[in-house]
Amino acid sequence: MHDLPLLINISIALAAAFIGGLLARRVKLPAIVGYLLAGIAIGPFTPGFVGDTDTISQLAELGVIFLMFGVGLHFSFTDLWKVRSIAVPGAILQMTLGTLAGYALSQVWGWSAAAGITMGLGISIASTVVLLRGLMDNNLLNTPHGRVAVGWLVLEDLATVLILILMPALAPQSGAFALSTLGLTLVKAGAFIVIMFLVGKRFIPWLLDRIAHTRSRELFILAILVITLATALGASEIFSVSLALGAFVAGAIVSESPLSHQVGADVLPFREAFAVLFFVSVGMLVNPIFLVQHLGQVLVLTLVVVVGKMLINLLIGFFIRGQAKTFMVVAAGLSQIGEFTFIVGQAGLMLGLLNRNQYSLILAAALLSITVNPWMFRLIPKAEQLFKSIPWLWRRLNRHTAPEATEDKAGEQPVVLVGYGRVGGHLLSVLRSMDIPVKVIEADVERVEMLNREEVPVLYGDAANSEVLTHAYLEHAKALVVSVPEEAAAEMIVNAAHEINPKLPIIARAATEEGIQRLTELGASFVVHPELEGGLEMVRHTLLELGLPRREVDEYAEQVRIKRYEAMNEYSTAQPLVRNILRAIGEIEITWIEVPQDSPLVGKTLAQSDLRGKTGASVVALVRDQKLNANPKSSTKFQAGDRVGIIGDSTQIFAVEAYMRGGDADS
């Protein structure tokens, strides 16, 4: 037998996390709850398998690095600025009051000042993961209230970075707070940030661009991992600042690159996997026996986190102008603590600011607050009714008719085009010629550069990864066209897009007959099979060249098309309906016909020609000297060279063409 302790610990930790996360989701709780319970189950304080705490903790450091890299990558001063009037003062007040509440409670329990400050700072920070999940589950993420809550949390994330910088200064040194240590820490952190933004901001995006040109996905992912880990380790070893700060700065710099969306997509699996190990390692530090023995303290701290933070956020609403529901959403969403509390708590544990029992209390409060958070959102309608029943209270809390206007990142409602190949390129040209806004997602960096030169909005990335699709704002798109030739990629794109916006019209390209059914079942509104369409066009033109009437040829081709698509997609009820609608529309054509020089219509008025009586078609427009005359009057005279807009079916159009040439309109 090989001795593989590292592999065994990783396998057991991930397996336990999988089971715990699955059970948590089955009872509609955040998966984090399951990961923490998994850590408790394999920890040293419970019977059964005991994981190696040191080994898993070292792996958990990677979780911290990737979590903070993700925060930096998605950090946006622009988003924060749009909701600054509420989010900035609100977050500062809430963190200050939350820290004071935690510190006051710690002094009642007889903790040291440093431990009390650490706990106060930890419980003042909410979980990004839990907030976003709560907003999405309650359809609040894309509302003005949800945007304020996210902006509020963005500021808390930034404050977390500052807290991690300052925490070493709180560590006991000669029994007193060392001001010189604080100054030195700030100087080192400032030097690191300045160097990274002066040098790294130029070098890192340039390096990623060069690697992308190699067209090697493996090298691109390796480059991201090296940049992330090297920056975090360099910050720690050279500048003596935290790994978390180094990873955050690396993410913030990479976010300046036009390739940042793909970076986020590629680093996501690593972030999720190692974040799971981080949560498991946190759970392993919890002693269930200690928590049972100190159940009263656990419940009191949980009440401070859940009820205390909720009341603080509502109280802030009386001093900051805003909508009442905005503060209710913030109060519900931020009445919990999570991953950043764990990071702050672990830093406090390593610096000797907290002992294990104190840390266990904080973790237990986090576990309980995350568990009850979904129910906090359900209290919003009841709280709204309660406040409205007290008019003076409602007027004070609801002092703004609407939240501050925020610019929609989506801008115009575009057609999102995935894949700029031959098919996608032709579609893009047509849409741009019609002034229809288009946003392209393309995985070839050279095509991305070409589109950038042509000032076409484009995202670099593999759209088969839903992380990239989220940046296309499909919630606001008019339609999604998936023109990638790989059917497996098309299926993943359609599935992810349908989950993001179930009402979005999706036009997809199928490579095989079986793919038509799969794409339709995954949410595609309309599926095109290029080989079938190409074959039908060849049949159609061949029959026309053989002299068969166009109407019968078109009807035959459409019948074949309907039968083949229905046969390939026998489980879809929508596809035949769409085909029948298209067929009905296809019976009416709007055609532009130029009046020949020797036409018998030249000099005649529209009334004299009696086009409608002789052919059944109607004249709906006329273009002369590059001027459009919509719905021309019956007194309008035809001139040679006029372009006449005719509406009618194919037989009627043929009759008009014959009549204009001087033939029999009935032929």
Image: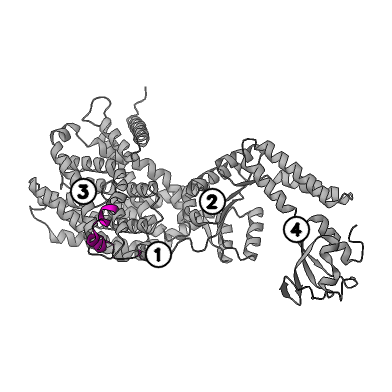
Q: Mark 2: few, some, or many residues within 10 Å (few <14, many ≥20)?
A: many
Task: Measuring from the top left, give residue 27's x and y in whole percent.
Answer: 34, 35
Residue at image mark 3: 307
Q: Choose top left, top right, bottom left or bottom right for residue 36.
A: top left
Q: Residue at x 19, y 45 (%)?
A: 303
Circle 4: residue type: Glu
Q: Is 148 located above or below residue 42 in the figure?
A: below
Tell me the element at label 1.
loop
Q: Which residue occupies the extreme top position in the image?
A: 1
Is residue 333 or residue 616 the one in the foreground? 616
Tell me the element at label 3.
helix
- Tell me how far mark 4 sits from mark 1, CA to CA: 44 Å
- Tell me how far mark 2 sits from mark 3, CA to CA: 39 Å
Q: Residue at x 26, y 24 (%)?
A: 48
- Tell me how far mark 3 sits from mark 4, CA to CA: 66 Å
Residue at image mark 1: 406
Horizontal relation, residue 167 to residue 452: left or right: left
Circle 2: residue type: Leu
- Tell me how far mark 2 sits from mark 4, CA to CA: 28 Å
